[in-house]
Every structure is written in structure tokens, then in C-alpha cells.
């Protein structure tokens, strides 16, 4: 009895430990999200923008990227990042970090990128970066660092780039140890409080630095060959009048790129700087309005090697005749974001090598005449100006042009002749213009064009033949402000088109004829209001056999989508719709798209879905049904979606998720249930258990979900819901279980005590039965013809009468117990052996026989196993 009780106690404690399972192994993180990725090794975790004050303790150990940006973290200690040995990138930007403990990053042996920018660090202490032997990029910008330990960078044996801009450093010796690092290529130290930058202060003979961004200093002096590899110098933000000393021009022999800005420098200083950079190829200047008129560009162009000039935000109004007179060797000129209204005749004429001319974001109202002669031009950008007219033969000699950007102008008409001769043009951007018609614009021209952007042009109608000659076109964007129409055959000729963006309201006709190679179609539909039913309307995409991706966004949806709307889309892998399949989905909708892997149906007021809808698409991997009115996911339980990995059902009206649903999605790794009406009741018990214990499926932000029902629980955290009420059921279960156990034990001991002998007997009968079965299966022959069962008192008769008769006269071989039983063997086994080795059993029945226990057993066994007994009568 005692034993039984302790067994049930043990069971009870086992049960209760199941109910209070361990959370720490769970996959749904408390304050972070693992970004979905098809590659299981790419574990990117983001905890950004969550008001965190400390690094969460449940970051998975296999995380590769961790984003902790924009929180309120104050310090990082040794334990916070323990074990994250796979981490390659760590972003802790925009926090309040004051302190980082020694050895904090010791476990981060794979880390390549560390961003500690925009924090409150004051010092970089000795062992701070210990262990970061693979770090390549370190950002420490916008802190208040004023002290750097001489040895802090020593562990960083692979470091390539360090950003220390916007700190409180004031001595160049502070960065001495950084410049020394042999692997360092890129150093940013702008916006500090350095007074000078002098090679004599640096205790290094040769630095491998390629790029240096430097703060405004009073003195810049290089008197040793310390930067033989320096390619790029960024001196933006220099406001002081400085002393610039480069004692030998060869010291900056590798410098090809110089970037400067601001206007407070003396013109003479600019000149001095430029004169010491004799290999310069690229000169970029911002905000140098003041020196433009004095001819700064011209001074720069006198460096023979210069090829690129980039002058932005400098309020240039006119490109004067002599402004670029020395710039004849330039290949790239960028004058974007100025106020250029006009270009003087002959201002650009000398630039016979020019390949790229960027005049973006200016006030030009006419095409600059001079450009007509720049026959070497390959890139011409006139976007964001006021140009209203394109005329002929303006572009005719620009035969090398490959990119022409005329977007964001006021062009209203394009004459038939405009694009004549542009036989190399690949990209044409006419976005945001007032063009009303394209009649013959592209006729027999632009056969090499691959990319055409007509987004937001004012055109109303595309007619047959408009695009006829654009046989190389791969990308076409005609997403417009207003609805337009494309006449039947309007897209004819676009045999190579792969990507098409389209806006309008009546595309559901026969308009995709001829687009047999289209792989992506993005439709922005104003309204899907049905027109007269016709076969084309019901099967609008039937001519797009190669289409892989279809996006349909409807601004005003209607409730009448044909079940065959996807007919013909046999290659479709991704379908994204918004407000398109309004209200319901016909079960046969996806019958035509067996390859579908990603499906999005949002803002469609779906409240009920049936599992049949998904039966034709068993390969579905990503399903987004967010922003609908679903009240149940039970359809998923029968839908059989074994490949489903990503499921978003946020912003619906779900209140209970049954365990059947959870179990039907074996491959799920990402589930978003946010913004539903989750009920904190026992019916969600399975869900909560699963969220907390699943090691495969992440339920995004689950720890932030709150109860909506019942009203008494409203606002409480969903996962905190106590199962006290559900406990009653569990306790009852335990009670019933243990009571049955007790009753069973009692019964067993009763039987054992009172019916033991019967049980033994039954046991032997059973053994006999098994034995016989085995023999029969094996087909072992019998050793005797008969076993004679008799009582000892009848032995005289058996030996004297029966034996001579049967063995002597008939030749039978009999088995007699006094003669043939094996001595030493248990009697029962001897009996069974005898019976089974004999074909028949002969029972010699007498008064003694009937009184003997053994004899009656022999009869029973023989009956049971030879299926007959000759002496039952
Ligand atoms: C890893 O996953 C993130 C998030 O899904 C993604 O942005 C990134 O491109 C992926 N990186 C690789 C190398 O697959
Ligand atoms: C980290 O999160 C911030 C804030 O959401 C975001 O702006 C930034 O792009 C993220 N960084 C990376 C590398 O994902
Ligand atoms: C880290 O910050 C927490 C407050 O967020 C504070 O309690 C703790 O003492 C700090 N640790 C150290 C080592 O400064
Ligand atoms: C780091 O270690 C140095 C000595 O090695 C010690 O002076 C300093 O206070 C330590 N810093 C922290 C934050 O523990
Ligand atoms: C920068 O240095 C000057 C003098 O060298 C000092 O007056 C000023 O306070 C310093 N600024 C900062 C932000 O350290
Ligand atoms: C710099 O070179 C000089 C002589 O060439 C040598 O004596 C000195 O040790 C070197 N300094 C460093 C820091 O390598
Ligand atoms: C400049 O340096 C080069 C090579 O280092 C040397 O040949 C030349 O004499 C130096 N010129 C001057 C003026 O010191
Ligand atoms: C243009 O380049 C040629 C050859 O490289 C050179 O002779 C000429 O002086 C350069 N012109 C200017 C203005 O730099
Ligand atoms: C185009 O080039 C031809 C021959 O080089 C020349 O005659 C014609 O004037 C040029 N046209 C323009 C518009 O510059
Ligand atoms: C550091 C931090 O803000 N941690 C939060 C993580 O999420 C849990 C549960 O939502 C909060 O209680 C913690 O404050």
C-alpha cells in the first residue's frame, strides 16, 4: 500500500513540473525578434527601438547579427555578451552607454563590425576590446571620448576602419597608436578638438592608411614620408585658416581624391593645398560659393591628372565661359544641387573627353546648347530642372550616350525625331513630366534601351505600336498619377520585358499579349470595379507563362473576382495582393498556380477561409494574411502546408489558436500574431505552452501580447496568464489517475492471494500452447505414437496387457512416464514434453486415475494442445 502511494506522489510531482516548464530555452525572445531568413545559419536578431535599459539575457547563442540600436542601455558588462561566439556584427548605436567593462567582447571571436556610435563613452580603457581579433570596422563616433589607452587597439589585428568623429579628442598623440595599426586603411577623426596634425608628433615611420577624414586644425604639416599609400583625404568642415605644410610634393604622391567644403578658408590656402596634390584625379567641393567666382574650379583643373570635378551646393547661377576653361581633360563633371539657370555658349566646348555630366537639381529651363557637341558623353543627367522642350537635333551627335535622365522636368511633348541616333542608350528616365502622348516617339529607335521609366507622366493612353521597336527593353515603369488605358496590343514588341510596373483601372483585359518573358508584374489598380464579364476579364493573365512575381494593389476593391483570375500563371511563385480578393476566396483560385511559394492577401476583409483554398499549393513557404478579419485559423489544420515557414496573421480577430493548428505546421519558424483579440482562457493553454517551449518557431513579440478577453484580464500580458483555473482540471486528472492506480494494486494483491494455484495452472496451459504452436510451425516430427496417461495403481495392467499388445503386436512406440520421463526434470515439463512428442494420448481411466491430480492435468493439457483425447469417454 505504501509503495502505491509513493508511486502516485511521484507521478503528481512529475505532472506539476511539466506545468511549470523551463522558459529559458524558448525560441520566442522576450524583447527581441529574430529576422526571418531562408538560411537557417543567418540568425539576425534585432532589439532596436524597444526602450531597453540592459542587454536582454535571451539572445540566442548562434546569432550572427545583433541590433541593439536606439535603446536606453547604460552599460555593458562581461556577462551581457557571454557566449555569442558566432556574432559577426553588433550595433549598439544611439544608446546611453557610459561604461563598457573590461573583457566585455572577449567571447566575440567572429565579430567583424562593432558600432558604438552616439553613446556617452568618455574613455577607451585598456582591455575594452580584448578578444576582437577579427574586427574590421569600429564606429565610436559621437561619444565624448577624451582618453584613449595606448594599448586598447592592440587586440584588433584585423581592423580596417575606425570612426572617431565627433568626440572630445584634442591631442594628435591620442590617435598615434591607431595610425600605427598595420591593417588600418580608413580613419575618420573629424569634429574633434585637435589643434594640429603634424607628422612629427606621430611615432610611426610608415602608415598604411588609404583614407583619412580629418578635422579642422591650425596646422597640417607633413615633413616625413609617413603616408605613402594615402589615396583619399576628406577635409570637409575645415573652417579655420590653417598653415598647410607638405615639405615634399612626393609625400602625397598616392593621393587621388580630395574632398573639401565650407567657405571660411582663405582662397590662398585652397591653392596651396591643391598645389601639393599633384596626382589628384577627383576633386569634390561642397559649399564653396565664395571661391567659385575667383576661379577655384579652374585652379583645380590645372592639376594635369584631374579627371573628376564635383561641386555641389555652391549656389552657382551661371556656368560662365571661362569657369571651366582649364578643364578640357575632365571625364566627369558634377554640378548638381546648385542654382544653375544658364550655361554660357562655349563654356563646355573644350571638354572633349567628358563622359559624364550631372546637372541634377538646378534651375535650367532650356537644354544647355553646348552639350550638343560633347560626342563622348555617356551619362547625361538633367533631372530635377525646369526643362519644357526637347528639340531636334539636340541629341543627334550624342551617339555614345548610355544613360539619359530627364526625370522631374516639365517636358510636355517629345517630337518624333528627338531620340534619333541614340543607338547606345540603355537607360532612359522620363519620370514626372507632363508628357501627354508618345505617338511615334520610340518608332524605329532606341533598340538598345533596357530600362524605361515613365512613372507619373501625364499620358492618358498607350496605343498599339507605341513600344514596338523597344525590343531590348527589360524594365518598364508606367505607374502613373491618373488611370490610363493601354489599348489592345499596346505592349506588343516588348518581347524581352521582364519587369513591368503599371497603374490604372482597367488592366483586366487582353493587355499582356506579347509579354511572354515577363517575370515581374506590379499592378497599382485604382479600382477593381468589374466591367462586363468576358473571358479576358476572367483570365487577364493567361498570356504570361513566365511570370514569377505578381503584385496587385487595389485602392478601392470590389467583391467580384473570378475564380479563374490566375489562370495561365503556371510559373507564379509569389503573389502579393492588397484589397483585391475582397471578402472571400474561391477554393479553386490557386488551382492554376501550383508553384506558389509566397502568398500575401491583406486588407481584404477576409473573415472565413476554407482549407480547400490551400490544397493546390502544397509548396507554400510564406503566407501573409495580416489586416483581415479572420476569427479562426482552423482552416490551417486541414490545409496541409508542410513547407510553411513564415506566417503573418497579425491585425485579425483571432482569439483562440487551437493545438491542432499548431501541430499542423511542422515547418513553421516565424509566426506573427500581434494585434489580435487573444483570450486569456484555458482554451489558449496549448498556445501559451507552445510559445514558451517551442525551440523551432518564433512567435514574434509574443511577450508583448496582451489579453483582450475576458474583460477582467484585459491589458494583462498574454504569456503571464495564470493557469490556476485550468489547474482544477489537471488536479482532477491526477486524482482519477492515482485512484485507479490504487484500485488496480488492491485487485492485484487479492488475485494473487486467492487464485494463485489457478493462475499457475493457467500459466502452464499458456506455455504449452505457445510451445505447441512453435513446434507446429517448425514441423518437428513426433517421437512417439502415443503417450499413455495412467495412475500408478494401474501400472500392472499397462505393463502386462497394454504394452505387449500395442508395442509388440501393433508396432507402436509408446511413451510411459516410469520408463521415458527424463529424471531430474520438473514433472510438469516432462508431461508437456511427453504429450507434444506424441501423436496421440491414451488415457487409462480408472477410479484411481480420476482421483489423481496429475492425471487430470494430463488430460487437460492433452486436450488443449493435441485438440483431442481418445479417452474422454
Ligand atoms: C540575413 O538575414 C537578414 C534578415 O532577414 C537579411 O537582411 C540578410 O540579407 C541576410 N544575410 C544573408 C547573408 O543571407
Ligand atoms: C538597426 O536598427 C535601427 C533602428 O531600427 C535601424 O535604423 C538600422 O538600420 C538597423 N541596423 C542594421 C544593420 O540592421
Ligand atoms: C549598469 O547599469 C545599471 C543600471 O542600468 C546599474 O544598476 C549598474 O550598477 C551598472 N553597472 C556598472 C558596473 O556600472
Ligand atoms: C579595466 O581594467 C583596468 C586595469 O586593467 C582598470 O584600471 C579599470 O578600472 C578596469 N575598468 C573597468 C570598467 O573595469
Ligand atoms: C577645445 O579646445 C579649446 C582650446 O584648446 C577649449 O577651449 C575648448 O573647450 C575645447 N572644446 C572641447 C569641446 O573640448
Ligand atoms: C623609424 O625609423 C628609424 C630609422 O629608420 C628607426 O630608428 C625607428 O625605430 C623607426 N621607428 C618606428 C616606430 O618604427
Ligand atoms: C622629395 O622626395 C624625393 C623622394 O623621397 C626625393 O628624391 C626628393 O629629393 C625630395 N625633394 C625635396 C625637395 O626634398
Ligand atoms: C591634358 O592632358 C594632356 C595629356 O595628359 C596634357 O598634356 C595637358 O596638359 C592636359 N591639359 C590640362 C589643361 O591639364
Ligand atoms: C554633329 O556633328 C556633325 C559632324 O561632326 C556636325 O556637322 C554637326 O554640326 C553636329 N551637330 C550638332 C548639333 O552639333
Ligand atoms: C531590459 C528590458 O526592458 N527588459 C524587458 C524585456 O521584456 C520583459 C517582458 O516583456 C520586460 O519585463 C523587461 O523589462
Image (cartoon, helix red, strand yellow):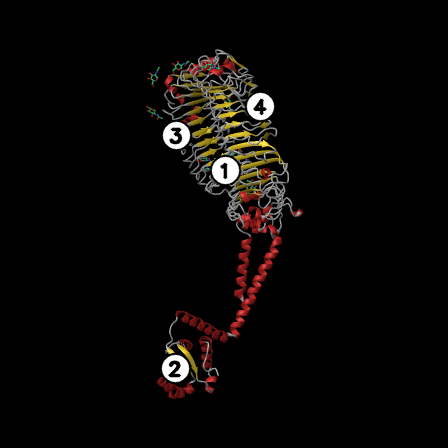
Classify 759 as above or below 873: above
Q: Which mark is first along the chain, 1 or 4?
A: 4
Disc number lying in front (2 or 3): 2
Q: Which mark is first along the chain, 3 or 1?
A: 3
Disc number lying in front (4 or 2): 4
**What is the spatial separation of the Cα atoms under label 1 and label 3, in whole angstroms?**
49 Å
User: Residue beneath label 2, please?
Assistant: 816
When asked about the image quadrant of residue 315, the answer is: top right
Q: Secondary structure at mark 1?
A: loop
**What is the spatial separation of the Cα atoms under label 2 and label 1, in whole angstroms?**
90 Å
Q: Which mark is first along the chain, 3 or 2?
A: 3
User: Residue beneath label 4, please?
Assistant: 435
Q: Residues within 10 Å of mark 2 (few under 14, many from 20)?
A: some
Q: Which quadrant would the N terminus be assigned to in this image? A: bottom right
**What is the spatial separation of the Cα atoms under label 4 and label 2, in whole angstroms?**
120 Å
Q: Residues within 10 Å of mark 3 (few under 14, many from 20)?
A: some
Amino acid at each position: 500500500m505504501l509503495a502505491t502511494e509513493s508511486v502516485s506522489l511521484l507521478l503528481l510531482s512529475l505532472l506539476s513540473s511539466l506545468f511549470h516548464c523551463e522558459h529559458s530555452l524558448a525560441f520566442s525572445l522576450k524583447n527581441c525578434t529574430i529576422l526571418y531568413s531562408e538560411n537557417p545559419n543567418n540568425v539576425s536578431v534585432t532589439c532596436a527601438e524597444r526602450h531597453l535599459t540592459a542587454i536582454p539575457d535571451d539572445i540566442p547563442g548562434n546569432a550572427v547579427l545583433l541590433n541593439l540600436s536606439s535603446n536606453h542601455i547604460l552599460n555593458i558588462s562581461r556577462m551581457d555578451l557571454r557566449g555569442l561566439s558566432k556574432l559577426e556584427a553588433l550595433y549598439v548605436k544611439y544608446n546611453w552607454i557610459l561604461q563598457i567593462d573590461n573583457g566585455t567582447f572577449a567571447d566575440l571571436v567572429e565579430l567583424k563590425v562593432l558600432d558604438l556610435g552616439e553613446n556617452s563613452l568618455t574613455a577607451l580603457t585598456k582591455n575594452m576590446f580584448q578578444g576582437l581579433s577579427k574586427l574590421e570596422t569600429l564606429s565610436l563616433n559621437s561619444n565624448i571620448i577624451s582618453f584613449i589607452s595606448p594599448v586598447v587597439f592592440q587586440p584588433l589585428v584585423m581592423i580596417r576602419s575606425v570612426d572617431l568623429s565627433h568626440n572630445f579628442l584634442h591631442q594628435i598623440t591620442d590617435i598615434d597608436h591607431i595610425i600605427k595599426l598595420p591593417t588600418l586603411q580608413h580613419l575618420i577623426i573629424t569634429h574633434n578638438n585637435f589643434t594640429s596634425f603634424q607628422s612629427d608628433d606621430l611615432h610611426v615611420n610608415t602608415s598604411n592608411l588609404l583614407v583619412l577624414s580629418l578635422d579642422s586644425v591650425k596646422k597640417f604639416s607633413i615633413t616625413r614620408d609617413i603616408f605613402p599609400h594615402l589615396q583619399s583625404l576628406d577635409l570637409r568642415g575645415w573652417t579655420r585658416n590653417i598653415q598647410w605644410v607638405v615639405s615634399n610634393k612626393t609625400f602625397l604622391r598616392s593621393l587621388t581624391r580630395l574632398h573639401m567644403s565650407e567657405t571660411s578658408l582663405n582662397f590662398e590656402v585652397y591653392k596651396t593645398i591643391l598645389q601639393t596634390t599633384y596626382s589628384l584625379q577627383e576633386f569634390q567641393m561642397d559649399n564653396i560659393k565664395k571661391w567659385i567666382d575667383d576661379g577655384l574650379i579652374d585652379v583645380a583643373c590645372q592639376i594635369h591628372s584631374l579627371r573628376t570635378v564635383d561641386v555641389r551646393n555652391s549656389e552657382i547661377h551661371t556656368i560662365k565661359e571661362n569657369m571651366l576653361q582649364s578643364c578640357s581633360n575632365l571625364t566627369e563633371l558634377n554640378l548638381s544641387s546648385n542654382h544653375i539657370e544658364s550655361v554660357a555658349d562655349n563654356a563646355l566646348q573644350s571638354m572633349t573627353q567628358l563622359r559624364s555630366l550631372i546637372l541634377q537639381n538646378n534651375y535650367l529651363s532650356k537644354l544647355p546648347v553646348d552639350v550638343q557637341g560633347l560626342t563622348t558623353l555617356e551619362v547625361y543627367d538633367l533631372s530635377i530642372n525646369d526643362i519644357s522642350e526637347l528639340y531636334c537635333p539636340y541629341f543627334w551627335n550624342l551617339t555614345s550616350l548610355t544613360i539619359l535622365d530627364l526625370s522631374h522636368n516639365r517636358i510636355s511633348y517629345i517630337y518624333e525625331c528627338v531620340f534619333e541616333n541614340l543607338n547606345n542608350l540603355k537607360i532612359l528616365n522620363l519620370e514626372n513630366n507632363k508628357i501627354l502622348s508618345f505617338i511615334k516617339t520610340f518608332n524605329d529607335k532606341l533598340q538598345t534601351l533596357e530600362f524605361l521609366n515613365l512613372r507619373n507622366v501625364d499620358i492618358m493612353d498607350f496605343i498599339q505600336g507605341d513600344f514596338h521597336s523597344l525590343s531590348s527593353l527589360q524594365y518598364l515603369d508606367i505607374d502613373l498619377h491618373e488611370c490610363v488605358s493601354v489599348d489592345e496590343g499596346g505592349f506588343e514588341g516588348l518581347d524581352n520585358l521582364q519587369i513591368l510596373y503599371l497603374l490604372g483601372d482597367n488592366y483586366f483585359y487582353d493587355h499582356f499579349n506579347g509579354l511572354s518573358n515577363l517575370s515581374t508584374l506590379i499592378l497599382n489598380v485604382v479600382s477593381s470595379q468589374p466591367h462586363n464579364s468576358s473571358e479576358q476579364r476572367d483570365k487577364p493573365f493567361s498570356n504570361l507563362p513566365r511570370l514569377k512575381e505578381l503584385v496587385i494593389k487595389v485602392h478601392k476593391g470590389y467583391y467580384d473576382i473570378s475564380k479563374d483570375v490566375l489562370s495561365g500563371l503556371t510559373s507564379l511563385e509569389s503573389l502579393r495582393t492588397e484589397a483585391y480578393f475582397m471578402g472571400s476566396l474561391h477554393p479553386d483560385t490557386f488551382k492554376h498556380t501550383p508553384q506558389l511559394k509566397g502568398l500575401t492577401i491583406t486588407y481584404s476583409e477576409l473573415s472565413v477561409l476554407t482549407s480547400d483554398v490551400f490544397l493546390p499549393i502544397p509548396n507554400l513557404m510564406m503566407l501573409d494574411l495580416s489586416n483581415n478579419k479572420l476569427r479562426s485559423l482552423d482552416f490551417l489544420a486541414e490545409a496541409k502546408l508542410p513547407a510553411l515557414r513564415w506566417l503573418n496573421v497579425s491585425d485579425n480577430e483571432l482569439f483562440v489558436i487551437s493545438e491542432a493548428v499548431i501541430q499542423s505546421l511542422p515547418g513553421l519558424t516565424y509566426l506573427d500574431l500581434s494585434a489580435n483579440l487573444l483570450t486569456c482562457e484555458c482554451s489558449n493553454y496549448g498556445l501559451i505552452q507552445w510559445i514558451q517551449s517551442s525551440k523551432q518557431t518564433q512567435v514574434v513579440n509574443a511577450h508583448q501580447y496582451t489579453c483582450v478577453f475576458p474583460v477582467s484580464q484585459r491589458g494583462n500580458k498574454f504569456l503571464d496568464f495564470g493557469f490556476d483555473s485550468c489547474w482544477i482540471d489537471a488536479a482532477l486528472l491526477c486524482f482519477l489517475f492515482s485512484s485507479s492506480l490504487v484500485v488496480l494494486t488492491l485487485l492485484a494483491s487479492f488475485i494473487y492471494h486467492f487464485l494463485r494455484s489457478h493462475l499457475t495452472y493457467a500459466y502452464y496451459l499458456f506455455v504449452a500452447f505457445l510451445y505447441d504452436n512453435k513446434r507446429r510451425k517448425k514441423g518437428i516430427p513426433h517421437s512417439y505414437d502415443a503417450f499413455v496417461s495412467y495412475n500408478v495403481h494401474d501400472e500392472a495392467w499397462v505393463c502386462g496387457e497394454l504394452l505387449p499388445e500395442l508395442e509388440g503386436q501393433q508396432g507402436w512406440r509408446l511413451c510411459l512416464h516410469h520408463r521415458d520421463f527424463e529424471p531430474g526434470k520438473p514433472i510438469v515439463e516432462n508431461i508437456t514434453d511427453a504429450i507434444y512428442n506424441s501423436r496421440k494420448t491414451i488415457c487409462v481411466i480408472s477410479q484411481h486415475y480420476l482421483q489423481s491430480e496429475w492425471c487430470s492435468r494430463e488430460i487437460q493439457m492433452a486436450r488443449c494442445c493435441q485438440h483431442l483425447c481418445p479417452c474422454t469417454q
